[in-house]
Image (tube, helix red, strand yellow):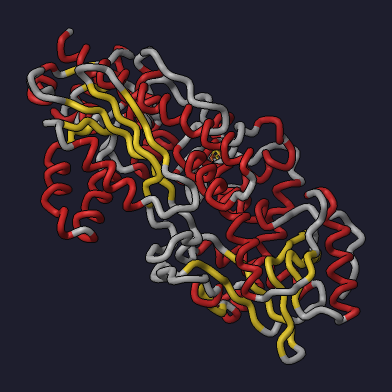
Amino acid sequence: MTEKKKKPVLSKSTFIKGLQCRKALYLYKNRYFLRDPLSAEQRAKFVRGTNVGIYARELFPGGVDASPKTHFQMAKSVEKTRVLIMEGKTDVIYEAAFSYDDVVVALDILYRENGQWKGVEVKSSKAVSETYHWDAALQYYVINGGGLKLDDFFIAFIDRDFIREGEIHPWKLFKLESRLEDVRLKNESVADILSELKHTIALKSSPDIPIGIHCNDPYPCDFIGHCWKKVPEDSIFLLEGIDERQLFEWYNNKGIKSIDDLPESVLIKPGYQKPLKSIRNNKPVSDKDRFSGYFPGSEKKQLILETFTFAPAIPLFNGTRPYEILPFGLGWMDLQTQKSDLLITEPGKNPQNDIGELLLEQTEQYDLIWVFNDTIEKALIDHYARNLPQKNDAFISIKSKLLDLRQPWDEQFVVYPTMKKLKKAEDILVRFDRPLEKLPENLEIPQEADALYQKLVLSENEKERQEGLTYLENYMNSKLKNLVNLHKLWLDFFQG
Ligand code: SF4
């Protein structure tokens, strides 16, 4: 292997960033301060990927970890890897680092079999995307270019059909597919792309690339706040139902930027009248008639229910699959008495049956049950109905009582400018300037509560468990109160 003298300028992530958009790469390297803050979704995704990567080491146990203490010490990691390979005392190296052509990469697993080195890149997902192929191709290019001839290159990903029974055998949980042919075919293209990316980084000013579908594909870009700041408040992107490619074509090439610039053929469509009015006036437009059929009579006994779930990538309980959605808690409030309660199942115990029983117990006496986005509740009820056939009727009856608090938004009972970007009850409350129960720090999104509960399942530290449970209780209480606030918001539209 040859040693690098120049400081590497690219990594796996910046290469993928550059593939997505040259401007994003330029800004990342030259105007980092313009970057948007890391979103809660991105934080949660990063933690999940790291956990799966570490678990995958069990595929080739007993290796030596070459990872650096900090991200800024990659050169040390490259040197450590070089020495480990040269000494030849180990057949497995984790986070083996290599540098070539101004790029530094860290391979999840490097192993030697019959005297030949092979590489494994681990992905926490259930399928291999085109982006992963490019990621693998870059690593192959750097490792081979650096002087280590790889005999094979695999992508390891999670087998969606795996069902846990007892101890997990890593070779059953992960699928390994050789991508040697593909990465070899891409080798020349990688060299060309790298040369172009390095040229982009060295530019005196940012490349002139308009906003487009690539701003969110394959990943949400870090510079949306910067590049989209000139998009007008009443932009055409607020209107749902028009193909995105068409919108960007109009916006970038035809000067159609705000909704009043839209072609007549769009402006006169009856389905767009409410959204257009709302965007023009920057005010909600509501349809009282739709609400009147939505709210039941007050004589009905009503419950607000929130189900809290987690979806471990690596199955924690027998009979479950990777990423299977499991409930870990319920929160509920009687709408008439305003009495509320919640329950979190003991971390470590398979929560499915406890939650199933609780669901039956708490909902039995009610005529109607309000939830937010009924997809999860419906899926869980179907699961219970299938797995507890003796209680099938009782579960099916719960399903028939569900009312969805997201329906007025999804079905345009109320239309609000920018509404299409709102995904959570909390977002809607903020938009309508309504009281909001603040969620605990670091639990802004369900994925973070999911990650915390998983951590508690695996923790043996009693203090950590107690603190975590208190956090989750606060989170669940706030979420439940926000559903009550949302119910009140829709009620006000109906009555007002
Ligand atoms: S926001 Fe869009 S145009 Fe701007 S850097 Fe990111 S991907 Fe490129």
Q: Which residue is at the front of the view, 20 or 257?
A: 20
Which residue appears at 56% of the width and 67% of the height?
133
Which residue appears at 13% of the width and 21% of the height?
291
The answer to whether any part of residue 25 appears in the image is: yes
Return the x and y of residue 96 as percentages of the image width and height: 76, 67
Give the position of the C terminus as an image quadrant. top left
Image quadrant in which you'd find residue 131: bottom right
Q: Is residue 287 left or right of residue 168?
A: left
Q: In this rendering, is residue 368 above or below 3?
A: above
Which residue appears at 30% of the width and 13% of the height?
283
Which residue appears at 48% of the width and 59% of the height?
316
Q: Is residue 170 left or right of residue 336?
A: right
Q: In this rendering, is residue 472 above or below 325?
A: above
Ligand 1's image quarter is top right
Return the x and y of residue 111 as percentages of the image width and height: 72, 78
The answer to whether any part of residue 264 appears in the image is: no
Q: Is residue 59 left or right of residue 83?
A: left
Q: Name the outermost residue toward the top.
A: 496
Give the position of the N terminus as an image quadrant. bottom right
Q: In this rendering, is residue 7 above or below 157?
A: above
